[in-house]
Amino acid sequence: RRAGPNQRLESVMAAMALQDRLDKRVVATSLLSAVLVGCGVRIFQHTQFLKKQLAEAREREKNLEATVAEEQRLRRAEREGRTRAQRKLNKQVDIGQYLGPGMTPIGFLDSTYRRRFGTPRQGCVVPRGRAMLRLDTSVQPKFSTQNLEEYSHVWLIYIFHENTNGNRLFAENPNISQTKAKVKPPRLGGASVGLFSTRTPHRPNPIGLSLVKLDRVEDGVLYLSGIDVCNGSPILDVKPYLPYSDSVVDARVAKWVETPVVQPISTVSVSDEALEQAKALLPELQFYHELEEFLDAVKEILANDIRSAHMRNSKLWRHEVGRFRFDNTSVCFRVYDDQDKTCQIVGFEYTVDTREATQTGEGDNEARDEEPGAGTIA
């Protein structure tokens, strides 16, 4: 049946209305596409701009890190040069002249700690640390040490001969102290305290006092443990420890000593390669004949975090391999400052280190002035 005129008109009008809606949608879609393309171009341009800014910032950061690293390298080189020069200067000094008339060492300590760096801040934290004191013949060792073995512990009075912060004998005015009035104990993480509130080795008169365990006395030779004194230290006197007079039960100490800011290392492990190296070097050791006791001694040292505040805060030292001399070895270690703060011994190297080499500073891994020295409390 044919559609009437009205129906045809309605169909045409409906078709025109549909076309109009389609045209509007096409226009709207085109406009939206144009807007999106414009936004995309702007976003792309802005992204490129940000990438360029980020690249420039990274380049500036890289240059800044390189500058800081170079400054730290130069500073370390300056310290190393100053340390070597000071040790050579110390060698020229007659220890008797340094002590003054009427005083002379009664012997020089033969210690498993070959350098300041690695020497514990207190001997009690490394009970397996060992030393031997062969007294000078002028004090008649066989007679002067009689009955000494009746005591379990003795006091050692000695000279901090490894100090590198200046020698008053060569200063313009020897009567003026070359030491700093405030120091930075390692366990305080860089904070300063008064010199006399610490046991830093850098003192107006570099005299050390250490409590050590007397293992035995043989033919006038003292065999010691729980030591915190460097190899070659001039010993001025040995006195027995008396608990009734030397121990104070209710003594008061600074809070930072009891609760240090810098926490000890939680775990010290030994790599497989380091273990094999230690086994090979065992016959070359002077103070240790059992592998387990040697490794336990090294672990005791590292467990107390021997690094200075500078080393802990420096990016150059983060996860870098550190070294310290112990017995006839150079111990290589790496500290991981993660949440648990762990340390791994990564190697042992054979190193002959006589007292002569110690006093001249040959081959030394110099430590910073505020770094732990023998007998320090911080």
Image (cartoon, grey):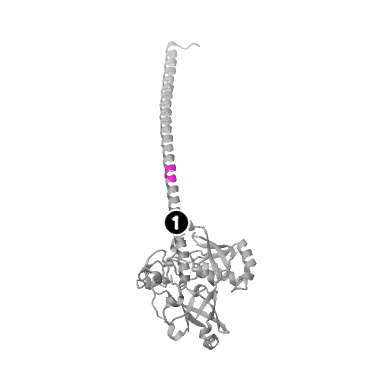
How crowded is the residue under tag 1: few (<14 C-alpha within 10 Å), some, or many (20+)?
few
Residue 67 can be seen in this image: yes
**Residue identified by numbered label 1:** 74
Label total for image: 1
The span picked out in magenta is: 55-59
Percent x, y of residue 316: 48, 56
Q: Looking at this view, is 336 or 195 the one in front?
A: 195
Quarter assignment of residue 216: bottom right
Q: Quadrant of the C terminus?
A: bottom left
Mark 1: amino acid = Leu
Main structural element of the magenta stretch: helix, strand or loop?
Answer: helix
Task: Measuring from the top left, give residue 252's x and y in whole percent.
Answer: 38, 77
- Residue 162 showing in the rendered view: no
Choose between 262 and 306: the one closer to the eye: 306
Does the magenta portion include 58? yes
Q: Is 248 placed above or below 4 here?
A: below
Magenta span includes 18: no
Compared to residue 2, the image places residue 173 above or below, namely: below
In x, y percent, where is residue 361? 50, 67
Residue located 43% across and 24% down the image: 26
Residue 221 in percent (x, y) is at 56, 82
Residue in the picture at 42% in, 46% down? 60
In front of the other: 252 or 105: 105
Q: Secondary structure at mark 1?
A: helix
